[in-house]
Amino acid sequence: LCLYHPQDGVECGLTIQQQLNLKPFAKIIELKPRYGMFLIHTTNAEVLNRLWCVHEVDEAMLAGIKIFGAIDTNSWTEKQFDKMVDTVCTRNAVCQDQDREMLTNLIQERGGFDRLDKEAVGVRKQAKSDLLAALSFQQLFSMDILSIERIDQKTPLLRRLSLVY
């Protein structure tokens, strides 16, 4: 069963270029997300090896959006994270050839790759600090920090912990 076939002459939506011209990520960033932007680090792939992800960091920085590093405490060890905290070179990020020039020029117009590297290192250093705190919590209390029910976002973490225990 084939519901769509290009030769049918049916329009199926915007082309990739038409979508890019709408600048969807920039529009989301303009909304000033309440909880900032999360740069998700995995043990499978380096997020900043993708130029589109580097571009998203650039957009967030331009808009003054706070960027947080997100990591899975069950996947990362301190030693693993240490290997990649300072190894950021966004200028080597890749994407399709047709997008590379546009994204590179945009990043260069806004101050270049070095400032993005500096931001990424800062985000990773904070994420490392968070990882160590989470691992320490797991060792001290023999439970995952994510298992704690949050009371509310305004209550400081130490106060929340004292209310839980």
Image: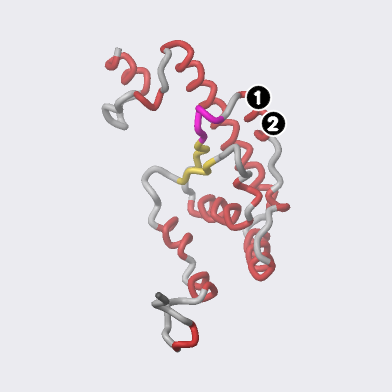
Q: Is residue 144 above or below residue 90?
A: above
Q: Residue at x 30, y 26 (%)?
A: 149
Q: Is residue 16 magenta?
A: no
Residue found at the very far front of the displayed protein: 1
What residue is shown at x 39% (from left), y 49% (from top)? 33
Q: On the image, numbered disc 1 is attached to which residue?
A: 79
Q: Which residue is mark 2?
A: 83
Q: Position of residue 76 (x, y in %)?
A: 57, 29
Quadrant holding the N terminus: bottom left
Query: Along the horizontal axis of the image, is 41 left or right of 9?
Result: right
Q: State if disc 1 and disc 2 touch (CB < 8 Å).
A: yes
Residue at x 30%, y 12% (from the top left corner): 165
Q: Which mark is residue 2?
A: none
Percent coordinates x, y for residue 47 in the rendering:
60, 46
Residue 15 versus residue 53: which sits nearer the camera?
15
Determine the main secondary structure of the stretch shown in magenta: loop
Image-based side of 2 in relation to 148, left or right: right
Q: Based on the displayed image, in which of its 4 quarters is residue 142 positioned?
A: top left
Give the quarter of the image for residue 83.
top right
Question: Residue placed at 42% from the left, 83% from the top?
Answer: 11
Query: Residue 13: image x %, image y %?
Result: 42, 77
Numbered circles on residues, count: 2
Q: Amino acid at mark 1?
A: Lys
Q: Residues within 10 Å of mark 1 (few under 14, many from 20)?
A: few
| Range of magenta residues | 71-75
Q: CA distance from mark 2 to mark 1?
A: 7 Å
Determine whether 45 is above or below 12 in the image.
above
* SS type, badge 1: helix
Q: Amino acid at mark 2?
A: Lys
Circle 2 — which element? helix
Quick one: label 2, few (<14), some, or many (20+) residues within 10 Å? few
Q: Classify residue 126 as left or right of residue 79.
A: left
